[in-house]
Image (cartoon, helix red, strand yellow):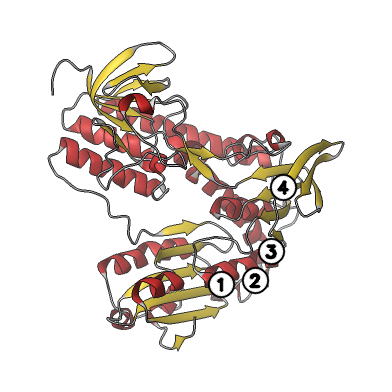
């Protein structure tokens, strides 16, 4: 590296991907700096996966207390306190953010607590201090943010997923717009905390891109929980009333509620970064265009994570950041394979998915075999709970390789992590069948499905 540069690597954004890349590069002796305009830790730690999962736990505890009576536990005067939950969540977020910052500092990374913008091919400007910096390599890891339809009258009255963690009080009722995993997760959270919850979504079905069986199954489970579903409609306007908010729908309906939440997508944070000054191009959706090595069209710039809009998951951003550092600072060229990445949706019941949906497998391979089972988990036998479980394996007929695993039900996110190892390794249905079951568990169904079904 040449001394004409202030740093060998400058990272814009201290989220999961940026932090991983910065620490690994610094460990190799590179002079590294990172700039973060909000809080170190990024979406996942500060306002995404981590605090949201605590809310999921809170909702599940409420349901578990009710279910426990079937097992002989009788608890009087149960009460939920929203401020107590939020204090705990913010305390843990503060702790994790401090760990991220400490790890960066211990790695020798220089931290700038302000916004950084590109000023040239290898130049940056810090917007608060005005300092100008030259870096040999620049990594953009600025993440994404919730999308707001600015042309929707009254959209400013609604909250997004970022705002949930700052609500002073828990609403009595809420209307959530969106049919994706964020909308569904928060619908289940609010419902589990006793909030009258309505889910409004544009399409005919929820969870676009997921396997059809999962989509239909979760729809039925949401309705069983008492969440009101309104498919095929969107907001026409949102208005403030004496009692709260009133949402008028395009097809003429009107819904009153204490709160309205927009969960209708996320967009890459590429606005006003000065990308054009470094020759970094974006696609029509605003995402930075990169190749498989996370290299942008700018000669000295790379990008990882949600800002590239490839596969917007925290572990993916981490692996992309790791691959960048391995390639550019450890002389170990490697890129991340985005195929067969497992994902979880923390609805009630939760979802775990890896590999191809049935229709995707047929489009790629033609003939496929489908194995599916639906049953009531043993845990709920005495709980008076009607919750069901669905498991599905998609098998390529030509060589019997399992190319998709789809689970909706208790512990699905935990199971799918291990199932992903098998899918990634290319195991066949016969190898699944040869694995001895663990009994009594719900997971044993993954290795005991024998009968093919129609899809």
Dot placed on the residue nearer the N-terminal end, 4 or 3: 3
Residue behind mark 2: 383
At x 39% / y 22%, what residue is drawn? 116
* Whole-number angstrom distance, CA of label 4 to CA of label 3: 24 Å
Dot placed on the residue nearer the N-terminal end, 2 or 4: 4
On screen, residue 116 above or below 163: above
Residue behind mark 3: 225
Residue 272 image position (x, y, % from top left): 45, 25
Instruction: Kindly check if marks 1 and 2 are in contact, taking CB atoms under 8 A apart as contact.
Output: yes
For the residue labelled by badge 2, is the local secondary structure a helix, a strand or a loop? loop
* Whole-number angstrom distance, CA of label 2 to CA of label 4: 38 Å
Image position of 140 (left or right of 66): left
- Pair 1/4: label in front: 4
Query: Mark number for residue 379?
Result: 1
On screen, residue 138 above or below 189: above
- Pair 2/4: label in front: 4
Out of 405 and 212, give the one closest to the viewer: 212
**How many callouts does the rendering have?**
4
The quadrant in which residue 218 appears is: bottom right
Instruction: Kindly check if marks 4 and 3 are in contact, taking CB atoms under 8 A apart as contact.
Output: no
Image position of 344 (left or right of 141): right
């Amino acid at each position: 590296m040449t001394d004409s540069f202030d740093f060998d690597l400058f990272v814009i954004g201290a989220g999961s991907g940026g932090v991983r890349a910065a620490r690994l590069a610094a460990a190799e002796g590179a002079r590294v700096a990172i700039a973060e305009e909000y809080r170190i830790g990024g979406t996942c730690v500060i306002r995404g996966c981590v605090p949201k999962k605590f809310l999921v736990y809170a909702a599940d505890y409420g349901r578990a207390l009710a279910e426990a009576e079937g097992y002989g536990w009788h608890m009087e005067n149960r009460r939920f306190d929203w401020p107590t939950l939020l204090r705990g969540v913010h305390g843990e977020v503060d702790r994790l953010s401090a760990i991220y910052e400490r790890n960066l500092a211990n790695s020798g990374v220089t931290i700038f607590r302000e916004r950084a913008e590109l000023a040239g091919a290898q130049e940056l400007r810090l917007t608060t201090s005005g300092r100008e910096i030259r870096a040999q390599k620049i990594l953009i890891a600025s993440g994404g943010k919730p999308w707001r339809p600015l042309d929707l009258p009254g959209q400013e009255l609604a909250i997004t997923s970022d705002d949930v963690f700052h609500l002073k009080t828990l609403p009595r009722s809420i209307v959530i717009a969106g049919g994706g995993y964020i909308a569904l997760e928060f619908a289940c959270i609010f419902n589990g905390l006793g909030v009258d919850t309505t889910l409004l979504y544009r399409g005919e079905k929820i969870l676009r891109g997921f396997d059809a069986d999962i989509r239909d199954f979760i729809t039925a489970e949401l309705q069983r929980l008492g969440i009101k579903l309104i498919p095929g409609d969107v907001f026409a306007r949102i208005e403030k009333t004496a009692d709260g908010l009133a949402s008028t729908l395009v097809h003429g309906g009107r819904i009153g509620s204490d709160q309205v939440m927009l969960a209708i997508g996320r967009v890459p944070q590429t606005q006003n970064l000065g990308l054009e000054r470094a020759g970094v191009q974006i696609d029509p959706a605003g995402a930075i265009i990169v190749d498989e090595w996370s290299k942008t069209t700018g000669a000295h710039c790379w990008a990882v994570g949600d800002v590239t809009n490839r596969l917007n998951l925290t572990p993916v951003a981490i692996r992309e950041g790791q691959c960048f550092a391995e390639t550019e600072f450890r002389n170990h060229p490697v890129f991340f394979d985005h195929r067969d990445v497992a994902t979880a949706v923390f609805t009630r019941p939760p979802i775990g998915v890896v590999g191809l949906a049935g229709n995707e497998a047929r489009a790629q391979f033609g003939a496929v075999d489908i194995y599916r089972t639906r049953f009531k988990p043993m845990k709920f036998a005495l709980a008076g709970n009607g919750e069901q479980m669905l498991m599905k394996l998609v098998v390529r007929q030509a060589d019997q390789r399992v190319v998709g695993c789809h689970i909706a039900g208790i512990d699905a996110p935990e199971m799918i992590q291990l199932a992903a190892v098998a899918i990634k390794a290319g195991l066949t249905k016969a190898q699944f069948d040869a694995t001895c079951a663990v009994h009594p568990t719900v997971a044993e169904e993954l290795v005991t499905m024998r009968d093919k079904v129609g899809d």
